[in-house]
Amino acid sequence: MSVTTELLALHGGPKTITQPLNRYNSIGREEVEAAKAVVESGILSQFLGCWEPDFFGGPKVQEFERQCEAYFGVKHAITVNSWTSGLIAAVGAIGIEPGDEVIVSPWTMCASATAILHWNAIPVFADIEPETFCLDPASVEANITPYTKAIMAVDIFGHSSDAEALMKIAKLHDLKVITDTAQSPGAYYKGKFAGTLAHVGGYSLNYHKHIHTGEGGILVTDDDEIADRLRLIRNHAEAVVGDKGVSDLRNMVGYNFRLGEIECAIGIEQLKKLKGCVASRQRAGERLTRGIRDLPGLRTPVITHDCTHVYYVYPIVLDVEKIGVSRARIVEALEAEGIEGLAAGYANVHLLPMYQQKMAYGSGGFPWTSDICHRDVSYTKGICPTAEKLHETTFLGFEMCLHELSDEDVDLIVRAFRKVWTRMESLK
Protein backbone atom coordinates (compact mmCIF):
# COMPACT_ATOMS: atom_id res chain seq x y z
CA MET A 1 0.00 0.00 0.00
CA SER A 2 1.41 3.39 -0.96
CA VAL A 3 2.14 6.18 1.46
CA THR A 4 -0.72 8.21 -0.07
CA THR A 5 -3.17 5.39 0.64
CA GLU A 6 -1.95 5.26 4.23
CA LEU A 7 -2.86 8.90 4.80
CA LEU A 8 -6.15 9.93 6.34
CA ALA A 9 -8.38 11.89 3.98
CA LEU A 10 -7.99 14.77 6.41
CA HIS A 11 -4.27 14.75 5.59
CA GLY A 12 -4.64 14.39 1.85
CA GLY A 13 -5.31 10.67 1.48
CA PRO A 14 -8.25 9.17 -0.41
CA LYS A 15 -11.74 9.23 1.08
CA THR A 16 -13.13 5.89 2.22
CA ILE A 17 -16.69 6.80 1.18
CA THR A 18 -16.65 8.53 -2.18
CA GLN A 19 -20.39 8.70 -2.92
CA PRO A 20 -23.11 10.23 -0.73
CA LEU A 21 -25.04 7.64 1.28
CA ASN A 22 -28.61 7.01 0.14
CA ARG A 23 -31.09 9.27 1.90
CA TYR A 24 -33.76 7.45 3.87
CA ASN A 25 -37.19 7.59 2.23
CA SER A 26 -40.07 5.42 3.40
CA ILE A 27 -42.58 7.02 1.01
CA GLY A 28 -43.49 4.94 -2.03
CA ARG A 29 -46.18 4.40 -4.62
CA GLU A 30 -48.64 3.16 -1.98
CA GLU A 31 -48.58 6.51 -0.17
CA VAL A 32 -48.93 8.43 -3.45
CA GLU A 33 -52.03 6.44 -4.39
CA ALA A 34 -53.50 6.80 -0.89
CA ALA A 35 -53.02 10.57 -0.89
CA LYS A 36 -54.39 10.83 -4.44
CA ALA A 37 -57.55 8.97 -3.44
CA VAL A 38 -58.16 11.41 -0.60
CA VAL A 39 -57.63 14.43 -2.82
CA GLU A 40 -60.03 13.00 -5.39
CA SER A 41 -62.62 12.38 -2.68
CA GLY A 42 -62.68 16.07 -1.86
CA ILE A 43 -62.59 15.32 1.89
CA LEU A 44 -59.24 16.66 3.09
CA SER A 45 -60.50 17.06 6.65
CA GLN A 46 -63.78 16.24 8.31
CA PHE A 47 -63.19 17.60 11.79
CA LEU A 48 -65.73 19.94 13.34
CA GLY A 49 -65.09 21.78 16.59
CA CYS A 50 -68.46 20.96 18.09
CA TRP A 51 -70.02 17.95 19.80
CA GLU A 52 -71.29 15.83 16.93
CA PRO A 53 -69.92 12.75 15.07
CA ASP A 54 -67.37 14.73 13.05
CA PHE A 55 -65.75 15.95 16.27
CA PHE A 56 -63.60 12.79 15.93
CA GLY A 57 -62.52 13.51 12.36
CA GLY A 58 -63.04 11.91 8.99
CA PRO A 59 -62.85 8.29 7.82
CA LYS A 60 -59.08 8.15 7.30
CA VAL A 61 -58.37 9.71 10.69
CA GLN A 62 -60.51 7.13 12.41
CA GLU A 63 -59.19 4.24 10.30
CA PHE A 64 -55.59 5.18 11.08
CA GLU A 65 -56.35 5.51 14.79
CA ARG A 66 -58.04 2.11 14.93
CA GLN A 67 -55.10 0.52 13.11
CA CYS A 68 -52.63 2.14 15.53
CA GLU A 69 -54.64 0.78 18.47
CA ALA A 70 -54.42 -2.72 17.03
CA TYR A 71 -50.74 -2.43 16.11
CA PHE A 72 -49.51 -1.08 19.44
CA GLY A 73 -51.97 -3.06 21.54
CA VAL A 74 -53.64 -0.10 23.28
CA LYS A 75 -57.24 0.92 23.96
CA HIS A 76 -56.87 4.39 22.50
CA ALA A 77 -54.76 5.99 19.78
CA ILE A 78 -55.30 9.69 19.07
CA THR A 79 -53.65 11.40 16.11
CA VAL A 80 -52.33 14.97 16.33
CA ASN A 81 -50.74 17.35 13.85
CA SER A 82 -47.29 17.16 15.47
CA TRP A 83 -45.66 15.34 18.33
CA THR A 84 -45.11 18.69 20.03
CA SER A 85 -48.91 19.07 19.98
CA GLY A 86 -49.12 15.55 21.38
CA LEU A 87 -46.87 16.40 24.32
CA ILE A 88 -48.83 19.57 25.08
CA ALA A 89 -52.08 17.61 25.00
CA ALA A 90 -50.63 14.86 27.18
CA VAL A 91 -49.48 17.24 29.92
CA GLY A 92 -52.86 18.95 29.93
CA ALA A 93 -54.85 15.70 29.89
CA ILE A 94 -53.22 14.30 33.04
CA GLY A 95 -54.53 17.27 35.02
CA ILE A 96 -51.39 19.32 35.60
CA GLU A 97 -52.00 22.53 37.56
CA PRO A 98 -50.05 25.80 37.27
CA GLY A 99 -46.97 25.57 39.47
CA ASP A 100 -46.90 21.77 39.52
CA GLU A 101 -43.48 20.27 38.92
CA VAL A 102 -42.85 17.73 36.18
CA ILE A 103 -39.55 15.84 36.12
CA VAL A 104 -38.08 15.57 32.64
CA SER A 105 -34.84 14.62 30.91
CA PRO A 106 -32.39 17.32 29.76
CA TRP A 107 -31.23 14.94 26.97
CA THR A 108 -34.09 15.50 24.55
CA MET A 109 -35.54 17.80 21.94
CA CYS A 110 -36.62 21.02 23.68
CA ALA A 111 -40.35 20.42 23.06
CA SER A 112 -40.46 17.79 25.84
CA ALA A 113 -39.83 20.44 28.47
CA THR A 114 -41.60 23.29 26.69
CA ALA A 115 -44.84 21.27 26.72
CA ILE A 116 -44.66 21.43 30.52
CA LEU A 117 -44.18 25.20 30.55
CA HIS A 118 -47.11 25.52 28.18
CA TRP A 119 -49.47 24.75 31.09
CA ASN A 120 -47.54 27.06 33.45
CA ALA A 121 -46.03 24.07 35.19
CA ILE A 122 -42.35 23.88 36.14
CA PRO A 123 -39.85 21.57 34.43
CA VAL A 124 -37.42 19.90 36.82
CA PHE A 125 -34.49 18.21 35.10
CA ALA A 126 -33.21 14.86 36.33
CA ASP A 127 -30.03 13.27 35.03
CA ILE A 128 -29.78 10.41 32.57
CA GLU A 129 -28.32 6.93 32.60
CA PRO A 130 -24.85 6.84 30.99
CA GLU A 131 -25.67 3.61 29.12
CA THR A 132 -29.13 4.21 27.63
CA PHE A 133 -29.23 8.04 27.84
CA CYS A 134 -32.78 7.76 29.26
CA LEU A 135 -33.95 9.18 32.60
CA ASP A 136 -32.05 7.73 35.55
CA PRO A 137 -34.66 6.45 38.05
CA ALA A 138 -32.34 7.26 40.95
CA SER A 139 -32.03 10.88 39.82
CA VAL A 140 -35.80 11.05 39.34
CA GLU A 141 -36.32 9.85 42.90
CA ALA A 142 -33.83 12.42 44.19
CA ASN A 143 -35.69 15.26 42.44
CA ILE A 144 -39.16 14.51 43.78
CA THR A 145 -40.64 17.20 46.01
CA PRO A 146 -44.11 17.72 47.52
CA TYR A 147 -44.89 19.69 44.33
CA THR A 148 -44.01 16.94 41.85
CA LYS A 149 -47.03 15.70 39.92
CA ALA A 150 -45.61 13.84 36.92
CA ILE A 151 -42.59 12.32 35.21
CA MET A 152 -41.90 12.73 31.51
CA ALA A 153 -39.60 9.95 30.32
CA VAL A 154 -37.93 10.17 26.92
CA ASP A 155 -37.21 6.95 25.03
CA ILE A 156 -34.22 8.40 23.30
CA PHE A 157 -32.41 7.32 20.12
CA GLY A 158 -34.47 4.12 19.75
CA HIS A 159 -34.18 2.58 23.24
CA SER A 160 -36.86 2.52 25.92
CA SER A 161 -36.41 4.12 29.30
CA ASP A 162 -36.77 1.88 32.37
CA ALA A 163 -40.56 2.00 32.34
CA GLU A 164 -40.98 -0.51 35.16
CA ALA A 165 -38.76 1.44 37.56
CA LEU A 166 -40.35 4.77 36.67
CA MET A 167 -43.89 3.45 37.06
CA LYS A 168 -42.93 1.99 40.44
CA ILE A 169 -41.66 5.40 41.57
CA ALA A 170 -44.81 7.05 40.21
CA LYS A 171 -47.08 4.65 42.09
CA LEU A 172 -45.17 5.24 45.33
CA HIS A 173 -45.53 9.03 45.02
CA ASP A 174 -48.93 9.17 43.27
CA LEU A 175 -47.53 10.64 40.05
CA LYS A 176 -48.49 10.34 36.39
CA VAL A 177 -45.99 9.21 33.76
CA ILE A 178 -45.79 10.44 30.17
CA THR A 179 -43.43 8.72 27.76
CA ASP A 180 -42.05 10.67 24.84
CA THR A 181 -41.28 7.84 22.40
CA ALA A 182 -40.88 10.12 19.40
CA GLN A 183 -37.65 8.41 18.32
CA SER A 184 -38.45 4.82 19.29
CA PRO A 185 -41.60 3.48 17.58
CA GLY A 186 -41.35 -0.28 17.31
CA ALA A 187 -38.86 -0.69 20.17
CA TYR A 188 -39.76 -3.26 22.81
CA TYR A 189 -39.53 -3.14 26.59
CA LYS A 190 -40.14 -6.51 28.26
CA GLY A 191 -42.38 -7.72 25.45
CA LYS A 192 -44.43 -4.53 25.07
CA PHE A 193 -43.99 -1.60 22.75
CA ALA A 194 -42.09 1.34 24.21
CA GLY A 195 -44.52 4.19 24.68
CA THR A 196 -47.39 1.98 25.83
CA LEU A 197 -46.32 1.30 29.41
CA ALA A 198 -47.02 4.71 30.96
CA HIS A 199 -50.27 6.54 31.65
CA VAL A 200 -49.92 8.17 28.24
CA GLY A 201 -47.24 7.98 25.57
CA GLY A 202 -46.78 8.28 21.88
CA TYR A 203 -44.77 8.68 18.71
CA SER A 204 -43.68 11.31 16.24
CA LEU A 205 -44.62 11.23 12.57
CA ASN A 206 -42.15 13.97 11.65
CA TYR A 207 -40.46 13.53 8.29
CA HIS A 208 -37.16 12.05 9.50
CA LYS A 209 -38.60 9.40 11.82
CA HIS A 210 -38.91 5.66 11.08
CA ILE A 211 -42.33 6.23 9.53
CA HIS A 212 -43.84 9.61 8.85
CA THR A 213 -46.64 11.68 7.41
CA GLY A 214 -44.54 14.82 6.95
CA GLU A 215 -45.62 16.13 10.33
CA GLY A 216 -47.84 14.47 12.92
CA GLY A 217 -47.99 12.34 16.03
CA ILE A 218 -49.83 9.46 17.66
CA LEU A 219 -50.86 9.51 21.33
CA VAL A 220 -51.51 6.14 23.00
CA THR A 221 -53.14 5.29 26.32
CA ASP A 222 -55.22 2.62 28.04
CA ASP A 223 -56.87 5.21 30.30
CA ASP A 224 -60.39 6.11 29.11
CA GLU A 225 -60.49 9.45 30.93
CA ILE A 226 -57.09 10.58 29.67
CA ALA A 227 -58.05 9.56 26.12
CA ASP A 228 -61.25 11.58 26.37
CA ARG A 229 -59.37 14.66 27.52
CA LEU A 230 -56.71 14.24 24.84
CA ARG A 231 -59.41 14.33 22.17
CA LEU A 232 -60.97 17.41 23.75
CA ILE A 233 -57.70 19.35 23.94
CA ARG A 234 -56.96 18.34 20.35
CA ASN A 235 -60.17 19.89 19.07
CA HIS A 236 -61.36 23.14 20.69
CA ALA A 237 -62.29 21.69 24.10
CA GLU A 238 -63.86 24.85 25.47
CA ALA A 239 -66.42 24.85 22.64
CA VAL A 240 -67.39 21.24 23.22
CA VAL A 241 -67.50 20.60 26.97
CA GLY A 242 -70.96 22.09 27.50
CA ASP A 243 -72.75 19.93 24.95
CA LYS A 244 -70.69 16.90 25.89
CA GLY A 245 -71.53 17.32 29.56
CA VAL A 246 -67.96 17.61 30.86
CA SER A 247 -67.92 18.75 34.48
CA ASP A 248 -64.14 18.76 35.09
CA LEU A 249 -63.01 21.86 33.20
CA ARG A 250 -59.34 21.70 34.20
CA ASN A 251 -57.15 22.39 31.17
CA MET A 252 -60.11 22.35 28.82
CA VAL A 253 -58.38 24.96 26.72
CA GLY A 254 -58.59 23.50 23.26
CA TYR A 255 -56.56 23.84 20.10
CA ASN A 256 -56.57 22.80 16.50
CA PHE A 257 -54.13 19.89 16.89
CA ARG A 258 -55.99 17.85 14.27
CA LEU A 259 -54.27 15.67 11.67
CA GLY A 260 -55.81 15.75 8.19
CA GLU A 261 -57.18 13.00 5.97
CA ILE A 262 -54.22 13.02 3.58
CA GLU A 263 -51.71 12.54 6.38
CA CYS A 264 -53.76 9.75 7.93
CA ALA A 265 -54.12 8.00 4.58
CA ILE A 266 -50.32 8.14 4.26
CA GLY A 267 -50.01 6.98 7.87
CA ILE A 268 -52.09 3.88 7.18
CA GLU A 269 -49.59 2.84 4.51
CA GLN A 270 -46.59 3.83 6.61
CA LEU A 271 -47.76 1.77 9.58
CA LYS A 272 -47.66 -1.32 7.38
CA LYS A 273 -43.96 -0.62 6.82
CA LEU A 274 -42.91 0.04 10.42
CA LYS A 275 -41.79 -3.52 11.17
CA GLY A 276 -39.68 -3.64 8.02
CA CYS A 277 -38.20 -0.17 8.62
CA VAL A 278 -37.20 -1.16 12.15
CA ALA A 279 -35.68 -4.43 10.95
CA SER A 280 -33.62 -2.55 8.37
CA ARG A 281 -32.23 -0.16 11.00
CA GLN A 282 -31.53 -3.02 13.37
CA ARG A 283 -29.67 -4.97 10.72
CA ALA A 284 -27.50 -1.95 9.93
CA GLY A 285 -26.96 -1.07 13.60
CA GLU A 286 -25.96 -4.58 14.58
CA ARG A 287 -23.58 -4.85 11.60
CA LEU A 288 -21.96 -1.55 12.55
CA THR A 289 -21.54 -2.74 16.14
CA ARG A 290 -19.83 -5.94 15.02
CA GLY A 291 -17.46 -3.88 12.90
CA ILE A 292 -16.29 -1.28 15.43
CA ARG A 293 -16.91 -2.65 18.93
CA ASP A 294 -13.26 -3.69 19.38
CA LEU A 295 -11.87 -0.19 18.72
CA PRO A 296 -10.13 1.08 21.88
CA GLY A 297 -11.77 3.98 23.66
CA LEU A 298 -15.10 3.54 21.84
CA ARG A 299 -18.31 2.18 23.35
CA THR A 300 -21.02 0.91 21.03
CA PRO A 301 -24.75 1.05 21.97
CA VAL A 302 -25.81 -0.63 25.21
CA ILE A 303 -29.09 -2.54 24.95
CA THR A 304 -30.50 -3.46 28.34
CA HIS A 305 -32.04 -6.82 29.19
CA ASP A 306 -35.46 -7.48 27.66
CA CYS A 307 -35.22 -4.40 25.43
CA THR A 308 -34.67 -3.84 21.73
CA HIS A 309 -33.08 -0.87 19.97
CA VAL A 310 -34.46 0.64 16.77
CA TYR A 311 -31.46 2.91 16.05
CA TYR A 312 -32.97 6.27 15.27
CA VAL A 313 -29.49 7.41 16.28
CA TYR A 314 -26.52 5.07 16.66
CA PRO A 315 -25.05 6.28 19.98
CA ILE A 316 -21.31 6.05 20.62
CA VAL A 317 -19.41 7.10 23.74
CA LEU A 318 -15.74 8.01 23.43
CA ASP A 319 -13.11 7.68 26.14
CA VAL A 320 -11.21 10.75 24.95
CA GLU A 321 -8.63 10.44 27.73
CA LYS A 322 -7.75 6.90 26.67
CA ILE A 323 -7.74 7.82 22.99
CA GLY A 324 -5.74 10.98 23.59
CA VAL A 325 -7.57 12.91 20.86
CA SER A 326 -10.51 15.28 21.23
CA ARG A 327 -13.95 14.36 19.98
CA ALA A 328 -13.92 17.34 17.62
CA ARG A 329 -10.73 16.10 15.97
CA ILE A 330 -12.09 12.56 15.61
CA VAL A 331 -15.31 13.88 14.04
CA GLU A 332 -13.28 16.00 11.65
CA ALA A 333 -11.31 12.93 10.53
CA LEU A 334 -14.41 10.72 10.16
CA GLU A 335 -16.27 13.36 8.15
CA ALA A 336 -13.26 13.78 5.89
CA GLU A 337 -13.50 10.03 5.18
CA GLY A 338 -17.04 10.64 3.92
CA ILE A 339 -19.26 9.73 6.89
CA GLU A 340 -22.34 11.96 6.90
CA GLY A 341 -24.69 12.57 9.81
CA LEU A 342 -22.29 12.64 12.76
CA ALA A 343 -23.41 14.63 15.79
CA ALA A 344 -20.89 15.67 18.43
CA GLY A 345 -23.00 15.90 21.58
CA TYR A 346 -26.79 16.01 21.69
CA ALA A 347 -28.72 18.21 24.12
CA ASN A 348 -28.65 19.89 27.52
CA VAL A 349 -32.07 21.51 27.52
CA HIS A 350 -31.63 22.90 31.04
CA LEU A 351 -28.80 25.10 29.76
CA LEU A 352 -30.89 26.81 27.08
CA PRO A 353 -31.35 30.59 27.56
CA MET A 354 -35.00 30.10 28.56
CA TYR A 355 -33.97 28.18 31.66
CA GLN A 356 -30.76 30.02 32.42
CA GLN A 357 -32.61 33.34 32.43
CA LYS A 358 -35.93 31.87 33.60
CA MET A 359 -37.75 33.81 30.94
CA ALA A 360 -40.75 32.27 29.16
CA TYR A 361 -44.02 34.24 29.12
CA GLY A 362 -43.56 37.98 28.87
CA SER A 363 -40.57 39.81 30.32
CA GLY A 364 -41.14 39.27 34.02
CA GLY A 365 -39.86 35.71 34.42
CA PHE A 366 -43.28 34.05 34.50
CA PRO A 367 -43.99 31.38 35.72
CA TRP A 368 -40.85 31.14 37.90
CA THR A 369 -41.25 34.58 39.50
CA SER A 370 -44.98 34.23 40.12
CA ASP A 371 -46.84 33.07 43.20
CA ILE A 372 -47.70 29.76 41.49
CA CYS A 373 -44.05 28.68 41.59
CA HIS A 374 -43.50 27.02 44.95
CA ARG A 375 -39.71 27.18 45.18
CA ASP A 376 -36.52 28.30 43.45
CA VAL A 377 -35.86 25.49 40.96
CA SER A 378 -32.21 25.30 39.93
CA TYR A 379 -31.08 25.03 36.32
CA THR A 380 -27.42 25.72 37.03
CA LYS A 381 -24.73 23.83 35.22
CA GLY A 382 -23.81 20.75 37.22
CA ILE A 383 -27.31 19.52 38.08
CA CYS A 384 -27.13 16.84 35.36
CA PRO A 385 -23.45 15.86 35.27
CA THR A 386 -23.87 12.73 33.15
CA ALA A 387 -25.79 14.54 30.42
CA GLU A 388 -23.43 17.50 30.57
CA LYS A 389 -20.24 15.46 30.18
CA LEU A 390 -21.71 13.42 27.34
CA HIS A 391 -22.79 16.54 25.49
CA GLU A 392 -19.57 18.46 26.02
CA THR A 393 -16.88 15.85 25.47
CA THR A 394 -17.77 12.17 25.01
CA PHE A 395 -20.97 11.53 23.03
CA LEU A 396 -20.84 10.89 19.30
CA GLY A 397 -24.06 10.09 17.45
CA PHE A 398 -24.42 8.71 13.96
CA GLU A 399 -27.82 9.80 12.65
CA MET A 400 -29.05 6.57 11.11
CA CYS A 401 -32.41 8.24 10.55
CA LEU A 402 -30.89 10.11 7.64
CA HIS A 403 -29.84 7.10 5.60
CA GLU A 404 -31.02 3.87 4.03
CA LEU A 405 -27.94 1.73 4.66
CA SER A 406 -27.06 -1.38 2.70
CA ASP A 407 -24.58 -3.89 4.08
CA GLU A 408 -22.01 -2.41 1.71
CA ASP A 409 -22.67 1.09 3.09
CA VAL A 410 -22.19 -0.12 6.66
CA ASP A 411 -18.98 -1.88 5.70
CA LEU A 412 -17.64 1.38 4.25
CA ILE A 413 -18.54 3.21 7.48
CA VAL A 414 -16.75 0.50 9.46
CA ARG A 415 -13.71 0.83 7.19
CA ALA A 416 -13.67 4.60 7.75
CA PHE A 417 -13.81 4.20 11.54
CA ARG A 418 -11.07 1.58 11.51
CA LYS A 419 -8.89 3.70 9.24
CA VAL A 420 -9.17 6.68 11.59
CA TRP A 421 -8.49 4.53 14.65
CA THR A 422 -5.48 2.90 13.00
CA ARG A 423 -4.01 6.34 12.30
CA MET A 424 -5.12 8.02 15.54
CA GLU A 425 -1.57 9.03 16.42
CA SER A 426 -1.52 11.33 13.39
CA LEU A 427 -4.43 13.29 14.88
CA LYS A 428 -2.64 14.11 18.13
Image: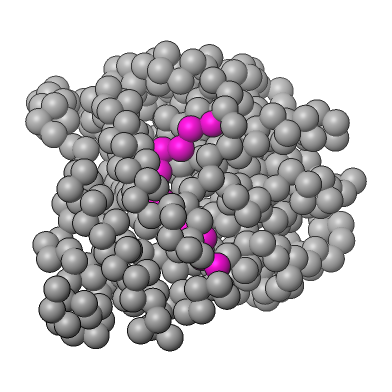
Give 415 or 362, whichever is nearer the viewer.
415
Residue 217, image x and y in percent?
42, 37
The answer to whether one can see residue 229 in this image is no
Front in this rendered view, residue 380 or 165: 165
What residue is shown at x 48% (from left), y 32% (from top)?
A: 308
Question: Splitting the image into 4 quarters, where does residue 426 fall?
Answer: bottom left
Which residue is rendered at x = 17% and y = 71% of the image? Answer: 15
Does residue 87 appear to the left or right of 67 in the view shown?
right
User: Magenta residues, as a range?
Assistant: 307-319
Residue at 82%, 58% (x, y): give it. 373
Q: Residue furthest right?
A: 146
| Camera-nearest residue between 84 and 130 | 130
Indicate the colouring scheme: one colour
Q: Position of residue 48 (x, y in %)?
A: 39, 27
Looking at the picture, how far across and down is residue 386, in whole percent?
66, 62
For the point 28% across and 28% down, which residue is it?
Answer: 276
In the rendered image of this protein, does residue 213 appear above or below residue 115? above
Give left or right: position of 345 versus 115.
left
The N terminus sits in image quarter: bottom left
